[in-house]
Amino acid sequence: MFIPNDRPSVLQLPKHEKDSTAADIKSIVANRDRRLIAVATNDAIYIWLANPQLLLCSVGVIDANFKETRGELKEIYWKPDSTSIAVTTNQCKILIYNLDLRDDEQCYNFTDSADPYFQRNSPELFIKGSRPTAHLHPTIIINLADIPTCCVPSRDEFLVCLQNGFTHHVTWTGEIIASLSFRASSIPFSVDQLQSKSENITSKSTYIFDAVYAPLLGGFAIVLSDGQGALLTSNDPNFAPNAILGVWAPNMKDATCCDVNHKFLLILFGCKNGDVCAYNIDELNGSLVQSFRVAPKVTNGPDLTNRLGPVHRITALANGYGFGAIWSPLSGAHALPRLVAVFTSFGAQSFCNLEGVVEEDQNDRYTAIEWGPEGFQLWLGTENELMMQPFVRSASCSSPAMEHCDRAVLMSDSQVLISAARDREAEACAPHSVWDHITVTHEYLSSNWPLRYASTDRNYKHLVVAGDQGMAYCSLSNRRWKIFGNETQEKNLLVTGGVFIWNDDVIGVVGVAADTDKSHLSFYPISQRLDSRYASVVDLEHKSVMSVLRDDVCAVFDISAQITLYKLTAHLETGRDAFTKVSTEIVTVIRINEIVPHPTCIVSLQMTQLNLDVRGKLSPAFYSSIDTVLVNISGRLITLSVNEDGKLHQPMVIASYVEKMWHDRCQVSQSTQSQNQDLPWKNHRRNGSNVSIQSVSTSTTSEPSSPMNQSCSSHLSNALWIACGAKGIKVWMPLVPGKRNLATQEMTFIAKRIMLPFELDIYPIVISAKDCLAMGVESQLQHVARASRNQGQMESITMYGLHRNSEVFVHHLLRQLLKRNLGVFALELAGACRSLPHFTHALELLLHGVLEEEATSSEPIPDPLLPRCVAFIHEFPEFLKTVAHCARKTELALWRTLFDVTGSPNALFEECLQLKQLENAASFVIVLQNLETTEVSMDQAARLVKEALEEKKWTIAKEMVRFARSIGSEDIDAFFRTPPPSAKTSLSRRPTVSSPSADSSTEFVINRFQAGAAGGRLNKVRHSQSTEQKDAPRKDSIGGSSKDKMALSWGLSGELSPQLATNRLAAKMTSILEDHAWHLLNNYWLLDLGFFWSELQFDLLGLLETRRKQISLSPKTTNENCFLIEDFALALTRLHAQFSWPYPLIGSQFVHQIEKKLGNIRVSQSTASLNGLLNDSLDNIKKPKARKLERTVVDLNGARSRIRETDIEASEEDVEIQEAVLERVRGSAVELAPVIDRSPSTSSSMNHHAPLAPPSPSSCDSRSLAGDCYQNTDFLVGEKSSRGNLQSSHQLELLLSLFSQTATIDWIFLFCLLSRDERKLRQEINVSMVRRAGEKSFARVRFACSELSRWAVEKCCGYVALLQAFDAHLAVVAEQAGCADLKFSPDNENRKASQKTSADDPKRGRRRADSGSSKLNNSFSNPKLNGMNGGRRERSRSADRAHKSVKRYDDVVCAEDALEKANEEGCSIM
């Protein structure tokens, strides 16, 4: 795989004439080793050095007469030894130039300045590579009878094809060999080389337009002038005219150019319609068989391919791992931007320059293309300029051992790029773009450019690279490089078979000694410096071209087509410099010369373990756990296995068109992986072989496990993955019986392995079988702006960046197994993949793919796969989610087909509600709205909204309300809403519709920046598709999980008004929302009300204001939707539970004040000691006397009446009671920020003592409470009394602002009391607020203060003094408002009902607590208490327990009686 990286380099071509126009590049050709690049324009020849890109020499045609007589230059050709070049013209001439290269003379030499500041000190500034001087000398001009069309150079001569149909053999000295000349019309052509009858070309004007030499195919690949393609073969090595036979390429009538891939034995043809077609030779009859036909694809611009012109030129890589092509614009159409594309060997597109290109008016086009050394450079020529684009490729192209890495490893000419580890990708913001760039040290690279081999160890600790000579390795932890200290030793080592790292501490090299020309296998210890003294050298018989490592076995393939397996053994060399020595032992020699046409055709070599016997028998092996050798010969994957008698089985071809392969057993043996999973191997037995083997080992190191212990994942871990280019991916999967009965398995014939093909949208370079993921790399075009050199203007430059992409493929495997009626194996495979995070998404892709294919088919399907697919998905709990998501992402016309198989959407909706899968139910509501009647869809939508509100799924409720309001009245009133009757038309795939995210409901956030915008709405949130395996956890009472709650933000001045109902469904939704809002208010669930207000954008402000006006205008009207608080104690305890707000403690300074009032008595500062002391002190206090007085009270109906009320008056004769005067606290102010404290607010020792009853609240003067926010309340409550966290404080402030705008004075009072904010109370409850809320509401608040004082005496002494101060302020406000004598007296029926609700029937207040507050209590209560089983709980903050303990004292009407009652019964502190 070759893809571009970085930005291209534009090279300037010098002009030989001042008035000459821009260079029109006609041809770019590299010499044999691709170190020199020849460029031909219409009037000049340039010789460039590939690295660095230096112009060595140039020759220009200046004489006008010469141009007229010789013509303009067209094509350039190299002599194989790089001593001469031939240039064709358009005037029947061929010019031959001699190239004089002098390696002893270097050009572009730099001389350092005498000034030390301008001298080169860095080694990167010195060019050590060869820069020979070059001179071009014209030697021969060959006159021809007609214009030459193409040439095919060889060592001693070159073939010249003319437009008159003749082809001549011309020597490099200019002599034409007339005896070997022939005409195209005289060549017999046939469809094969054996049986078919040959015929000559009838047209005399037909000539050879393009030709390429294909020695491994036995001739020349040609393109005729009429567009036909063929292969010229001959049994004569000189290609005598009478021995030439042409073989037609079938269905090739529009060829424009051709090239040959020598490694994969392919002939490539470029066509007039823009396609690239490849042919290979059939071994049976010698005919040409089409391998593939591809065209460039543009993902983001498919319309561009409609303007695709003919292929202008095609060129294959020298190593055969890909090819590139350029296209001409289509005549008569809008000009297509210049186009170049790169493909893999079998046609998989890896790069197209039109991806991401902004289409502009480009008059030029690519006119020439050529690959640089090792494919790391792509030279391109246009009508105006010459450019060079750097490329990178996969390291596995030259090192087969790198095919099985779990990370992407790429290499360029000077760098190695390694992707980040999978477990560390989460640490990066863009992990797909993060690469580890390892630049090879300049000391090695300067004389050994470019890199040819790169390999890492299994743990990515070391990296070893090799160029032309020697090698270098690096420690990836510290980036330290080591090279040969002796430069002679480095130049003596020529690497030919690759490098590898064995056992994490030894480097292996397969190469040739330059001085002796002998091949050897060398090992160098990493712990020592690179030196021949520490090397372990093993001599090889022949030159080796490939090596591969597996565990302790190294396989070497040499030019004699022999595979030798070496057993490696390491031992420590004794001495002062102890180092690791490696000894080898030949265990197996395999000769495959009969099936290998040439050593160049070997693509890859792997050792693995494929054979598996279900009954646990041992399989014959070459050595240890190696029973199979996989050899890729020109794209044919062949297995070599041994028989029990020591001979090889007949080689078996298991796949064709193979580019790469992956197998987990190729890198790690069975015994190594058996620690985690021990799997037996099946044995493939085939008798007879014509391939010899010298020795074989049948011993195994580990016994295979029983099949009953096998895991279902063995289907993937033992599978062989194959990349087949344009033909997609194939997997050779074993059908392991798993946990089924072996007796049944033996009775049924099932192939031990099955080949499953499927397609991927990416080209994989890594296959992760355990994750069912294919990882690929793509090069994306990026536009970067930079300052221009001209007057500081900005210019845009383009460069390419590497990005990794992944794709799941488990749904493809399941589909292929279901298609072959292997549902049992599909279930086993799916069971092994259930833990994958993308498994649900894979089921969705499976259903969507089958549905789209079968529903849009124009022909009836005899055996449809959709019913089987639905039945298969129904076996998993993700069935409803899969069907719902598939329906949302599918065209409306396909819904009928889907639900005819899955069942009625109404039934699926009911099942979702039963299982509480509300997200899926929301998807089915959309389906019901289009398939069912109006009444059904409206009822189901209303049910879903109610259920979502009950479950606190705010996002679902919000989306359903928005969906209801978006429907027009004419749509919802329509009687029939059915999809189009026909689904057989061509349908385009719609964009993916995402489901609401479960996590978005945990945010109680309203946009503060929309303040002041009347009727403003929150911005729409784009929810991401959930791919979680399990449903999102249920939310607690604050609308989400108990962690990571976000802070509130809200602009209260901006009112949210609901959209006017335009249909019945929207009106019904609005009614449901209003009812739920009142439900939350009446049950005191204020935190849920806040989330409801925020997430659903509900106009709570207008609702409360409207209700307040209705109550104030009609005071006698009774309605259950009344936001007046019935039970203040229950409401306060629920606020504590919902907002996780601790209860207050008594302040230490207040304790000292009480001590002084009681006398000089030493007491403890703790509240517990205070309670005990006060109980003893109050034993001597006599009961006060009672007196009667008349007061004016107001009942619930607003009627005034005068009643008699009992008050308490202390007897001056018995006891002297002094009034406690509250003074302003002096000292440092308390921090305004609340303290986050999750610990219990009281001590267990305080529960056994009764607190002191405070003086009557009416006897306090609030005018002495002026001060800061928390200063005076801390004096009463305690400075260390913890409050809620910052988020809860912010939430309380927002809700307080809401109720302040609607004059909801009872809730204002409670929120001020909860937050202990006396200053806020004075700001909110004043004379103006009393006038807005009404005297009745204010009198009720004063009554609530007295009720809470009585409750605090028994339940929470910390509130007693706080309520004292609050009541003092209320008294002052009442006096200022002129309603000081008004008192509130609830109706007897309401009061009894309230008492019954508070004490006898706690289910009403607990109804919502049971559904959502359990997680909240577990998250915010004391962890120690949560772990107690059966132990005594000191205190519970939950609203349920507080509600149960509420007790009203109707007979207690003063603080003194409350004190006596408390002394008798005791008081618990909360």
Image: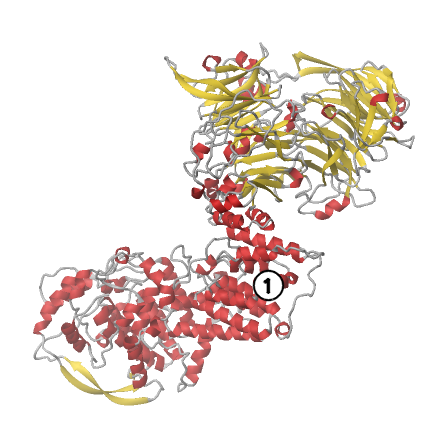
* Image quarter hosting the C terminus: bottom left
- The residue identified by callout 1 is 899
* Residue at 65%, 54% in the rendered image: 853
Q: Nearer the viewer, residue 253 or 1393?
A: 253
Residue 672 to residue 427: above or below: above
Question: Which amino acid does the dot numbered 1 rest on?
Answer: Phe
In the image, is 1072 to the left or to the right of 1467? right
* Residue at 51%, 62% in the rendered image: 920
Residue 1438 in which image quadrant: bottom left
**Label 1: which secondary element:** helix
Q: Dot 1, how many residues are within 10 Å of its Cα: few (below 14), some (14-19), or many (20+)?
A: some
Residue 1408 to residue 992: above or below: below
In the image, is 860 to the left or to the right of 755? right
Residue 909 to residue 186: above or below: below
Residue 128 to residue 1411: above or below: above
Q: Nearer the viewer, residue 273 or 828?
A: 828
In the image, is 67 to the left or to the right of 153? right
Let me know if residue 793 appears in the view: no
In the image, is 404 to the left or to the right of 180? left
User: Where in the figure is residue 926, as x and y percent of width and height?
Assistant: 57, 65
User: Where in the figure is residue 342, as x and y percent of width and height?
Assistant: 68, 36
User: Where in the figure is residue 948, as x and y percent of width and height?
Assistant: 47, 67
